[in-house]
């Protein structure tokens, strides 16, 4: 029997392509497994940015409501177990190994009631997705939350017809797979929408391709800036409150206000999640239209956070980690970082080669910083020289490093009291940074 490390090594090389989009193979294995989500409330969440935090808020609200919840997300930062959560906890190694063994056996042994009799080769993500679905099915969850890995239409999570579909945002990312315009990308992500499904559109100015799909499928939808949204809070004297936010959602023809001033995750993602909670409440016939009372929501909002999202790893030196890896997420990060008081910013950046490195760095360059560009230890990892070239359009204060540990050591050498070290660019970078911090023992960890 393989242990988890051995299973992960196996599924990384079991298929000829690391990314092989399409539903044919994974659907056959799912059918062989006998997966049935008919009596489970399934929520599928697609989007360029904001999927993880939106899923996490929905998860926590459903748990507070007393439901048994399974959450599948990707990628992970430190441990694969992070991808599959049951009742708010990462799946245990033994549970994952049992599921992998079942999926592997089923993929390689046909059953009499399935069309294909051939052994099925599965990609890493397909193995992980089937593993998650099997675990949730056997656990008899009430709510199954599926975060789309890439796109939507051809993503392995889309083999399940969700009751509720959510699209958080649309931006330029994965263009080689999804198309080189936001209109094309939006159409791919809207591929999660099913006939007569309830849908939440979490971004403003819905694309025509999405509108067309919603209309053709007769889907009931709620949209940002029409049915819910965010507005600036006002101070007691009537003046505009700087940086303060409140949300609103139209429920039963009445605008319900939500206090977001203490939120740890992006306000727009909280409101997108709350809009989804309304549909979940309807699914279960709950009397509370937002699943939780407003009081309960206000207690929950400051207590929901996500690893790798403006996460403080250390206080001294002050090290902040964020997995922003495209233009839109970089813009949001810059806005958030500018709210933090610091003397000088040190940016450690490492990115994947298939990302728009130049556009992302152009956005991050709005922060006056010293840069430490590093290679990433993965096949898709970009080398430091490309990052250096992009940074040099804005600043000459940059150095190249062959690994994150060396970059971190140099940033710490140049760190002074009240400075900030910002680590940004990739989930791979995040994992390497956490490992380096533990290895170097540079600070007392305070992962908030």
Image (tube, helix red, strand yellow):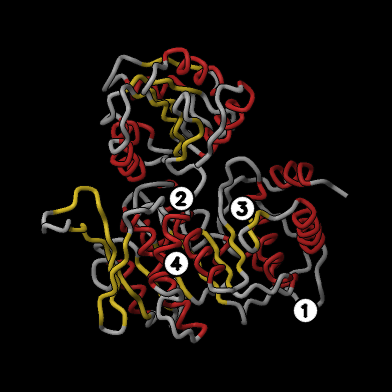
Cα separation, mark 1 vs mark 4, equals 28 Å
**Residue 376 located left or right of residue 13:** left
User: Which callout, 4 or 3, points to the residue nearer the camera?
Assistant: 3
- Looking at marks 4 and 2 on the same chain, the residue that comes earlier in the sequence is marked by 2
Residues at badges 3 and 1 in contact (C-beta under 8 Å)? no
Q: Badge 3, how many Cα within 10 Å: few under 14, some, many 20+?
A: some
Quarter of the image holding residue 108?
A: bottom right
- Counting from the top left corner in percent of width and height, residue 204 is at 26, 62
Q: Residue at x 32, y 44 (%)?
A: 332
The Cα–Cα distance between marks 2 and 3, rounded to whole angstroms, is: 22 Å
The residue at the point 75 percent across, 55 percent down is 96
For the residues labelled 1 and 4, say whether their Cβ atoms are less than 8 Å apart: no
* Local SS, label 2: helix
Of the numbered discs 1 and 4, the one sitting upstream in the chain is 1
Q: Name the residue under label 3.
A: 83
> Residue 191 bears which disc, if any?
4
How far across and how far down the image is residue 360, in percent? 34, 36
* Residue 202 at x, y percent in the picture: 34, 63
Residue linked to disc 1: 113
| Residue identifier under label 2 | 177
Residue 214's quadrant in the figure? bottom left
Residue toward you, 259 or 36: 259
- In front: 159, or 204? 204
């Amino acid at each position: 029997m393989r242990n988890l490390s051995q299973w992960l090594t196996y599924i990384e090389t079991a298929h000829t392509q690391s990314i092989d989009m399409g539903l044919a193979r994974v659907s056959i294995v799912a059918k062989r497994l006998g997966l049935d989500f008919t009596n489970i409330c399934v929520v599928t969440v697609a989007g360029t940015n904001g999927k993880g935090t939106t899923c996490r808020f929905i998860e926590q609200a459903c748990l507070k409501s007393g439901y048994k919840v399974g959450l599948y997300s990707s990628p992970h930062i430190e441990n694969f177990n992070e991808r599959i959560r049951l009742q708010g906890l990462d799946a245990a190694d033994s549970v994952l190994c049992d599921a992998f063994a079942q999926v592997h056996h089923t993929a390689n042994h046909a059953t009499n009631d399935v069309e294909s009799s051939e052994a099925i080769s599965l990609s890493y993500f397909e193995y992980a997705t089937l593993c998650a679905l099997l675990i949730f099915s056997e656990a008899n969850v009430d709510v199954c939350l599926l975060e789309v890995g890439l796109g939507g239409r051809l993503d392995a999570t889309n083999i399940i017809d969700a009751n509720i579909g959510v699209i958080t945002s649309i931006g330029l990312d994965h263009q080689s797979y999804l198309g080189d315009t936001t209109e094309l990308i939006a159409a791919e992500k809207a591929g999660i929408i099913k006939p007569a499904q309830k849908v939440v559109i979490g971004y403003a100015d819905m694309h025509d391709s999405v509108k067309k799909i919603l209309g053709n499928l007769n889907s009931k939808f709620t949209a940002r800036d029409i049915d819910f949204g965010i507005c600036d809070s006002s101070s007691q004297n009537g003046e505009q409150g700087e940086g303060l936010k409140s949300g609103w959602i139209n429920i039963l023809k009445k605008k319900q206000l939500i206090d977001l001033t203490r939120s740890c995750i992006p306000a727009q993602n909280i409101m997108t999640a709350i809009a989804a909670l309304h549909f979940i409440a309807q699914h279960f016939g709950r009397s509370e239209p937002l699943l939780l009372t407003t009081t309960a929501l206000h207690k929950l909002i400051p207590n929901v956070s996500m690893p790798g999202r403006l996460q403080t790893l250390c206080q001294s030196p002050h090290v902040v980690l964020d997995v922003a890896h495209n233009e839109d997420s970089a813009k949001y990060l810059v806005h958030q970082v500018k709210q933090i008081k610091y003397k000088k910013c040190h940016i450690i950046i490492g990115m994947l080669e298939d990302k728009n490195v130049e556009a992302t760095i152009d956005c991050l360059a709005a922060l006056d910083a010293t840069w430490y560009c590093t290679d990433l230890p993965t096949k898709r990892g970009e080398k430091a020289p490309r990052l250096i070239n992009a940074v040099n359009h804005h600043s000459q204060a940059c150095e190249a490093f062959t690994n994150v540990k060396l970059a971190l050591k140099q940033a710490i050498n140049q760190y002074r009291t009240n400075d900030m070290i910002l680590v940004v660019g990739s989930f791979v970078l995040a994992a390497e940074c956490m490992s380096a911090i533990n290895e170097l023992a540079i600070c007392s960890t305070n992962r908030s």
